[in-house]
Amino acid sequence: MAKTPTTTNFPETRPYMFSGTPTTIAFFKSKEQFLSKLRKHICNPEEPWERLLGRKFVRKLRQNLDGMAVCTLGDVYLKVVSVLDDGIQFASQAPLYIKYEEVSTSKTTRSSTSVLLLLAPKGYVMPAHNDIVRTAYFPSKDLNASWFTLFREAWKDIKQKLSFRERHDSASGARKQQINVAFYSEENWRSCPRTHNSGRRSRQRPWQDQIEDELI
């Protein structure tokens, strides 16, 4: 019997706990935004999403993306959300995320956005703006890298981006500043976890075991 396609409402939400605060995170604010990120990242052959979602799934997605029915898109969306949910669970529990306010100032307006930068154990990054995940991407484009290498490169990429607290947005012409930056935890952002160098698993935290088991 053929599987009945799933219909779903955008956006799906999931509850998490960040530094003791219950937080509801939504996944993509609309179907249009989700499709845009499918094209830009998940269907991008330079990013290793095939290793997470399955080669057959991603390749079929590339072939049928433009003509996809809404009901089929619901199945794809829920599968992607499931993978991202695993990543956020890890980031919130490790913890391995960064929280800050992004202030955008132009000649006529000033606005502020709450941002969470979340690092998944498989090496992809999820920025959540005002508690909405807007995208997910691999900073490293090395398809043959180990999971741990992808994780380490993503960790380094986030650190580098956060070293510049002010930038000019060429698209909008606005000046953007990152203020009230908080690292969770400071220890995990001071040096990248390197559990593959440890031979004594009993001293590792559960999430470090996950890196060692799954990423090497």
Image (cartoon, grey):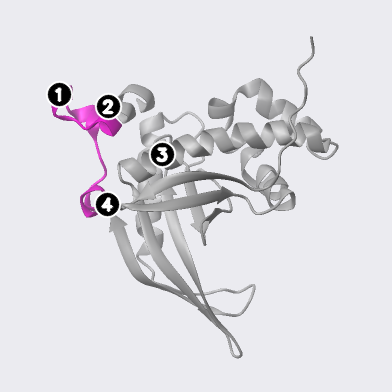
Quadrant of the frame with the C terminus: top left
Residue highlighted by disc 3: 89
Measured Cα–Cα span from mark 2 to mark 4: 18 Å
User: Which residue is farthest bottom?
Assistant: 107
Residue 69 pos. (x, y %):
84, 35
Is label 3 in contact with label 4 (beta carbons under 8 Å)?
A: no
Q: Amino acid at mark 2?
A: Asp
Question: Is 70 above or below relative to 155?
Answer: above
Measured Cα–Cα span from mark 3 to mark 4: 18 Å
Using the image, tell me which numbered label, if any, was put on residue 209: 2
Q: Nearer the viewer, mark 1 or mark 3?
A: 3
Question: Is 118 above or below relative to 72?
Answer: below
Is 177 displayed left or right of 53 in the figure?
left
Is label 2 in contact with label 3 (beta carbons under 8 Å)?
A: no
Compare marks 1 and 3 and give the one earlier in the sequence: 3
Is label 2 in contact with label 4 (beta carbons under 8 Å)?
A: no
Q: Amino acid at mark 1?
A: Ser
Magenta segment boundaries in residue numbering: 186-209
Q: Nearer the viewer, mark 3 or mark 4?
A: 3
Is 13 displayed left or right of 57 in the figure?
left
Using the image, tell me which numbered label, if any, was put on residue 189: 4
User: Which residue is farthest top?
Assistant: 1
Measured Cα–Cα span from mark 2 to mark 1: 9 Å
Task: Out of 119 and 143, give the one closest to the viewer.
Answer: 119
Q: Name the residue rendered at 32%, 28% in the picture.
A: 210
Residue 80 pos. (x, y %):
60, 35
Residue highlighted by disc 1: 202
Q: Secondary structure at mark 4?
A: helix
Q: Amino acid at mark 3?
A: Gln
Q: Amino acid at mark 4?
A: Trp
Residue 68 pos. (x, y %):
82, 35
